[in-house]
Every structure is written in structure tokens, then in C-alpha cells.
Amino acid sequence: MLSCRQKTYPYPRTPPTHSRRSRRLADQLEDAAVVGISGIFYPITSLPEWLQWIAQVFPIYWMGLGMRSALLPDSAVAVEIGESWRHLETAGVLGAWAVLGLLVAPVVLRRMARGESGSTVAARREHALRRIG
């Protein structure tokens, strides 16, 4: 029986197709879980308090809160946490996420591009463009 290290794939760092699909499915399920607890589809106050705290860690809750405060009538604030739109907290949390993204993005992009030649990137770009159009 061959171990994973003995198997060879066409590209050294490319996992088998089924694990790419599995990873995509897992990512979609994680996203659905975050959206599900974020208060987008139903009031977050109907969730247990510990789950409300977890939901408030993610920016989607705060984006939804900002959109609700802009689009819903003032009477809708009754179903929000603390019966307040919390404009300052919304701006602060979304600003913190933006700064975090700006700090982390160069590191992640540099790491992704490491070991990639220009011709490899160009070939993948051409392949993606053929697939789209």
C-alpha cells in the first residue's frame, strides 16, 4: 500500500481534486454557519447569549447591523441587542476589521506567490480566462 508521500501528482503542491472539493464544501458550510448566527435572517436576540457573543466577533454581523440601521424604520431597533443601532461600535469594529485586513493581506499574498514563476502565473491566468469566456 502506498502512503500519501509516495503518490505523485501533476503539480507538486496541488492536492487531489476530491480534497479541493471537500475543502470548498467545508468553506461554504463555515460561511453558512457564520451567516446563520449573524442576525441577517432572523433577530440575533433570539439566539442564546453565548452565541450572540460569537456572532459579534465576525464583521458580517456588524455589516448587517449597519444596513438594518440605514434601511429599517426606527421601530425595528427593538429587536437589536441593547435596543440600539450602536453606530459608533459598528464603525469601530468594521474599521478594525479593515485595518486587520490591510495588515494581513500583504503577508498572505506574499506567501501565496512564493515559489511561483511569472510563466506559471501567466499560464494559470490564461487557463482561467479560457474557462470564463
Image (cartoon, grey):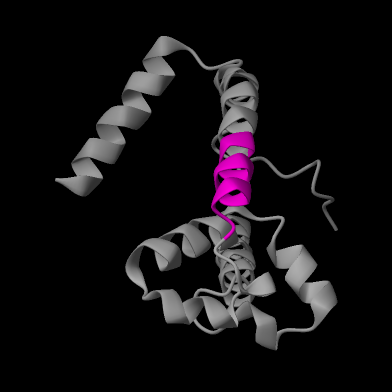
Quadrant including the N terminus: bottom right
Q: Nearer the viewer, residue 8 or 126?
A: 126
Magenta residue check for 75: no
Q: Where's residue 120, x and y in %?
A: 42, 20
Q: Nearer the viewer, residue 133 or 91?
A: 91
State which quadrant residue 22 falls in: bottom right
> Is residue 96 positioned above or below 75 on the image?
above
- Residue at image position (82%, 52%) is 2
Q: Where's residue 39, x and y in %?
A: 57, 75
130 horizontally vs 19: left or right: left
State which quadrant residue 112 falls in: top right
- Residue at image position (56%, 23%) is 109
> Is residue 14 positioned above or below 27 on the image?
above
Q: Where's residue 44, x and y in %?
A: 63, 78
Question: Residue extending furthest top?
Answer: 118
Quadrant including the C terminus: top left
Question: Residue extending furthest bottom?
Answer: 46
Q: Nearer the viewer, residue 2 or 43?
A: 43
- Residue at image position (57%, 43%) is 94
Number of numbered discs on residues: 0
> Is residue 27 positioned above or below 72 on the image?
above
In the rendered image, is residue 12 in sight?
Answer: no
Question: What residue range appears in magenta?
Answer: 86-96
State which quadrant residue 5 falls in: top right
- Residue at image position (77%, 65%) is 54
Question: Residue extending furthest left?
Answer: 133
